[in-house]
Amino acid sequence: MKKISVLIVLSLVFIQSCTNTKEHQNTDENSAKKEINNLLTDWHLGATNADYEAYFSKMDSVSVFIGTDASENWNKKEFETFSKPYFDNGKAWDFKTLERNIYLNNSGDFAWFDELLNTWMGTCRGSGVLEKKSGTWKIKHYVLSVTIPNDDIQKVIKVTREKDSIFLSKFKQ
C-alpha cells in the first residue's frame, strides 16, 4: 500500500511538472511573439517617421530586404544606401499592418512571420525571418510583395511583359 501511495504521489508530481513546463513554454512563446510584434510595428513606424536609426537598428547587420521590383534584392548596406535619401528628406514610407502571423521554432530563437499591409501601393504582403541573438530579436530577411487579384493577373502580365523580358535577358546563357 505504501509503495502504491508513493507511486501515485510521484505520478502526480510528474504530471504537475509537465503541466507547469507546458504553461511556461506557452508563456515564453506568447512573450516572444509579443516582443516580435512590437519590434515589427516599431520598425514600420521608424519608416513612417523617417527615423533612419529606429528603422535600420531593427535589422541584422547581414540582413536582406527584397522589394517589389525584380531588381530589389538588397543586403542591409545596399538597402540603407537606397533608402537614406528618403529618410533624409523626411518622408520614407508608411505601411500600416492589417494582420500579422508570427511563428517560432522550438528553441525560441528563430521566428518567421507574414503580414498584410495597407500601403501607398495598395494592399501588400510582407514576410520575413528574425533571429534572437544575445537576447535581442533582429530582422534577418524581409520580402515585400504587391498583391494582385487573381482576376487581374493577365492585365498585370501584359503591362510588365516588356520590362520583364529586358530584366530576364540578364539571366540567359
Image (tube, helix red, strand yellow):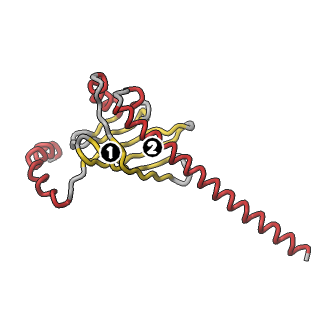
- Horizontal side of 105 relative to 25 (left or right) equals left
Q: Height in image: 89 above or below 7?
A: above
Which residue lies at the image location 75% right of the left edge and 64% below the top edge?
Answer: 14
Residue type at the position of mark 1: Val
Element at label 2: strand
Which residue lies at the image location 34% right of the left edge and 28% below the top edge?
Answer: 50
Which residue lies at the image location 43% right of the left edge and 34% below the top edge?
Answer: 58
- Horizontal side of 69 relative to 100 (left or right) equals left
* Quarter of the image where one finds residue 53: top left
Q: Position of residue 67 (x, y in %)?
A: 27, 41
* Quarter of the image where one finds residue 149: bottom left
Residue type at the position of mark 2: Leu
- CA gap between label 2 and label 1 equals 12 Å
Crowd around label 1: few <14 · some 14–19 · many ≥20 (10 Å)? some
- Horizontal side of 110 relative to 89 (left or right) equals right
Q: Which of the pair 102/6 is nearer the observer?
A: 102
Element at label 1: strand
What is the residue that sits farthest to the right in this orientation?
Answer: 2
Q: Position of residue 170 (x, y in %)?
A: 15, 42
Which residue has dot 1 on it?
143
Q: Height in image: 124 above or below 85?
A: below
What is the residue that sits farthest to the bottom in this orientation?
Answer: 1
